[in-house]
Amino acid sequence: MAWIRRVRTASGATAVQVAEYADGRRRIVAHVGSAHTEAELGLLLGRARVLLEDAQRAELDLGVEPTPGRVDLIAAAEELSLFDDPVRLGPGVGQGAAPRVVATCSRVLFDALAGVFTDLGFDVLGDTTFRDLVIARIVEPTSILDTGRVLADLGQQPASEKTMR
């Protein structure tokens, strides 16, 4: 966004510039001129406004005014129920420790890569161990010894090391 900048020069005049912020720095787009009187300053400010308007008109005008949509960010407390008729518990009942994550896996990644493997026609081999090795190497190029860890991270049960060799 550009704006009109007025700066006092060393000679005592007032410089009028069109400036903008780019990459976190102020950049002077155009130096309109220097004014020594109020009348000159008014003329230079008018010229600077015309420059700003011309720069803003360079955008494609579709004649449509943007209207911001209204969206509720948080639902009302009554609507936050998982069940239609929640069971009412007494105070302190059912309040255990905070939930904890027991395990995670990248099953979506594995399924996507298995789909590509199938789309390329490699599934006609019928070898799931080969498929798992290919997918594991795509995800993380590593040794056969470490391929089991990669497959476990992807949510797969790895074959034994001797089977993979």
Image (cartoon, helix red, strand yellow):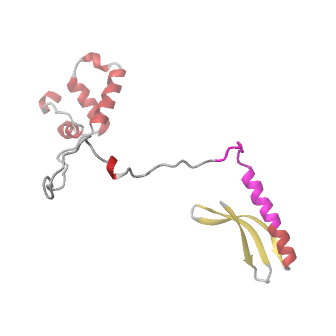
74 and 57: which is toward the camera: 74
Percent of width and height locating residue 101: 20, 49
Name the side, left or right, on which 136 lies relative to 34. left
Percent position of residue 125, x then y: 26, 17
Residue at 80% over, 69% down: 45
Would residue 63 be found to the left or right of residue 88 on screen? right
Q: Which residues are magenta?
A: 46-65
Judged by its main secondary structure, the magenta piece is helix
The magenta stretch spans residue 49: yes
Look at the image and tell me in which quarter the C terminus lies. top left
Is 118 on the left-hand or right-hand side of 64?
left
Residue sitting nearer the eye, 132 or 165: 132
Q: Quadrant of residue 156?
A: top left
Q: Residue furthest top?
A: 124
Q: Is residue 165 visible?
A: no
Residue 41: x %, y % from top left: 82, 74
Can residue 21 be spotted in the picture? Answer: yes
Q: Quadrant of residue 143?
A: top left
Dividing the picture into quadrants, the one containing residue 53 is: bottom right
